[in-house]
Image (cartoon, helix red, strand yellow):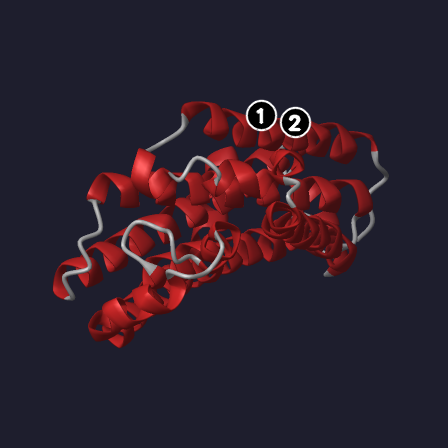
């Protein structure tokens, strides 16, 4: 029964994951095409900015401003937003739609329900990340952006783990509350607050405090230039694992509705 549940989740998510990957990969193509002939002008414009401001707008990223904008804002917002919305509704949505009683009446444990739905979200995020990588790699080669493929792989892996982490928090919130709107709001609010803290604290000369934000472990080691940072990936993975454990216990102990 677990295999059937997981297969159903993958089937449910396949088109949305495909759309997510195609859209953000396509945004990479569009941004690179738009800025390919403007790299020198953008570089001159941002050269006089303070380092903190240059980092905030993505001007100091490998590949320049266009790559920085894509991976500092557009792709993370899309991936984390998708993870939060789907994670918040994947289990709590069953209660909201009054279909949970049908699901739990099947020969399957509550642990299997959480596991299958979490793995379905994971599969969707992995698929979207692969499409993002492919789209950006093709665009970089097409417009001579010169983006290193090892760096591109690293930033996509970091982004994947960031999205997994916030998705796991959303799943946990849904398991604890049974309310998809509330779960999405909790995880989304945490994601936005953490992003603002990571972006703004360095501007106030408080960069050390930014390490409390999960977003620091996404891009703080500059994976586009330095490759995958195993310790930063581990931090995101541990937070995600703790959230999943909370989801298991919360869902197992709560009186379900619907």
Q: CA distance from mark 2 to mark 1?
A: 6 Å
Q: CB atoms at circles 2 and 1 under 8 Å apart?
A: yes
Residue 154: percent from left, percent from top: 33, 38
Question: Which of the labelled discs sits on residue 88, or is there none?
Answer: none
Q: Which of the two residues, 149 or 20, is positioned nearer the viewer here?
A: 149
Regarding residue 4, the answer to whether it shows in the image is no
Residue 58: percent from left, percent from top: 42, 57
Q: Residue sitting at 51 percent across and 55 percent down? A: 56
Q: Residue sitting at 49 percent across and 44 percent down? A: 120
Q: Which of the two residues, 149 or 120, is positioned nearer the viewer here?
A: 149
Relative horizontal placement of residue 86, taking residue 102 as reference (left or right): left
Regarding residue 204, the answer to whether it shows in the image is yes
User: Badge 2 is on which residue?
Assistant: 242
User: Badge 1 is on which residue?
Assistant: 238
Q: Quadrant of residue 248?
A: top right
Q: Residues within 10 Å of mark 2 (few under 14, many from 20)?
A: some
Is residue 129 depicted above or below 114 in this figure? Answer: below
Label 2 element class: helix
């Amino acid at each position: 029964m677990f295999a059937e549940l997981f297969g159903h989740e993958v089937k449910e998510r396949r088109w949305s994951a495909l759309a997510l990957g195609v859209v953000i990969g396509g945004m990479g193509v569009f941004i690179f095409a738009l800025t390919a002939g403007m790299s020198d002008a953008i570089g001159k414009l941002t050269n006089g900015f303070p380092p903190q401001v240059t980092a905030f707008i993505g001007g100091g990223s490998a590949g320049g401003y266009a790559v920085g904008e894509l991976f500092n804002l557009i792709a993370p917002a899309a991936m984390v937003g998708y993870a939060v919305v789907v994670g918040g509704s994947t289990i709590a949505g069953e209660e909201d739609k009054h279909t949970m009683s049908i699901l739990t009446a099947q020969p399957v444990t509550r642990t299997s329900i959480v596991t299958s739905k979490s793995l379905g979200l994971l599969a969707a995020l992995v698929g979207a990340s692969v499409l993002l990588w492919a789209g950006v790699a093709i665009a970089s080669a097409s417009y001579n952006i010169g983006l290193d493929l090892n760096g591109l792989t690293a930033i996509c892996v970091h982004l994947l783990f960031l999205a997994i982490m916030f998705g796991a928090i959303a799943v946990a919130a849904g398991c604890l509350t049974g309310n998809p709107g509330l779960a999405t709001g909790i995880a989304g609010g945490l994601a936005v607050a953490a992003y603002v803290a990571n972006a703004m604290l360095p501007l106030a000369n408080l960069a050390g405090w930014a390490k409390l934000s999960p977003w620091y472990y996404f891009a703080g080691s500059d994976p586009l230039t330095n490759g995958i940072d195993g310790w930063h990936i581990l931090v995101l993975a541990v937070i995600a694992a703790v959230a999943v454990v909370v989801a298991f216990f919360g869902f197992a102990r709560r009186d379900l509705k619907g």
